Amino acid sequence: MLRHRVIPSLLLRNEGLVKTTQFGKASYVGDPINAVKIFNEKEVDELIVLDIDATREGRPPNFAMAEELADECFMPLCWGGGIRSVEDAKTLFSLGIEKVAIRSAAVDNPGILRAIADRAGEQAVVASIDVKKGGFFGGTQLLNGNGVKDKRSWQQAIQTAVAHGAGEIMLMSADHDGMRSGMNLELIREASKLVEVPLIAAGGIGKTEHIREAVDAGADAVAAGAWCVWQGPQKAVLITYPRYEELTALWD
């Protein structure tokens, strides 16, 4: 296993995989089962799948798809999207999902994190926090489950999530999503000082050096989306993952 996890993060829409840019237009990138098979062959350590429409549409997780992916997946699988109750999480765990990523509910009802952690352990609960630059006074703002800026503090959201049982924080910079030009290192530095649980940084990876930069800034792991599904300036679709030796060399 790698010293610092490099986790492919896949976005699910209508049972197909898509990739967004700065949380905007979503481009189709392929079949989720085929992607999982490729990551199996690449011997990836962990995988994240996020249903990006479940919360917005007010529906529960796609349990049938979650089960199909879990059956195919050789590595631990984290599922996010539509999880609003302990029963939702319990059902996902029964289908073979190892972790659940809670986004909207983690901000609006952090008690759900503790309720799930008490049943499955804190290591199975990931609080997914999305942020974006801007606002009347500038700075970085928290986004709610629908991608709208929230008046609440993202720093407080992270600390509250951990206090309520989140075993990991996945912090996504919407401004860097799909850009492949490097991660928000300032954001990572600040977030890493707020909590002691593992921090998964997301948004902006375009080459292996970006992973090293994020880890040096304080990330315990990174989640990679565009880097694993797009190749070249024209964004040609290619589901891929670097060689194990290429990643271990980052910390040799």
Image (tube, rainbow, N blue to C red):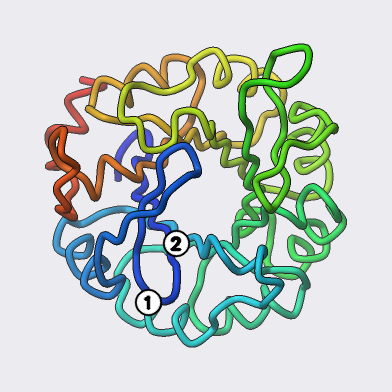
Which percent across, then down, holds residue 232? Answer: 13, 36
Res. 31 image quadrant: bottom left
Q: Is residue 11 left or right of residue 135?
A: left
- The three-letter code of the residue at mark 1 reads Leu
Which percent across, then down, holds residue 166? Answer: 71, 48
| Label at residue 49 | 2
> At 72% from the left edge and 33% from the top edge, which residue is drawn?
142
| Label at residue 161 | none
- The three-letter code of the residue at mark 2 reads Val
224 versus 139 height, above or below = below
Q: Is residue 180 left or right of residue 240?
A: right
> At 82% from the left edge and 57% from the top edge, which residue is drawn?
114
Q: Secondary structure at mark 2?
A: strand
Name which of mark 1 and mark 2 comes first in the sequence. Answer: 2
Determine contact: label 1, label 2, CB under 8 Å. yes
Q: Is residue 30 left or right of residue 186?
A: left
Which percent across, then down, holds residue 21? Answer: 40, 40
Q: Is residue 157 left or right of residue 186?
A: right
Which percent across, then down, holds residue 78? Answer: 49, 61
235 versus 173 height, above or below = below
4 versus 8 height, above or below = above
> At 23% from the left edge and 27% from the top edge, which residue is drawn?
208
Q: Secondary structure at mark 1?
A: helix
Quadrant (top left/top right/bottom left/bottom right) for the N terminus: top left
How many numbered discs, if any?
2
252 versus 160 height, above or below = above
Residue sitting nearer the eye, 239 or 215: 239
Residue under numbered circle 1:
69
Badge 1 local density, few (<14 within 10 Å), some, or many (20+)?
Answer: many
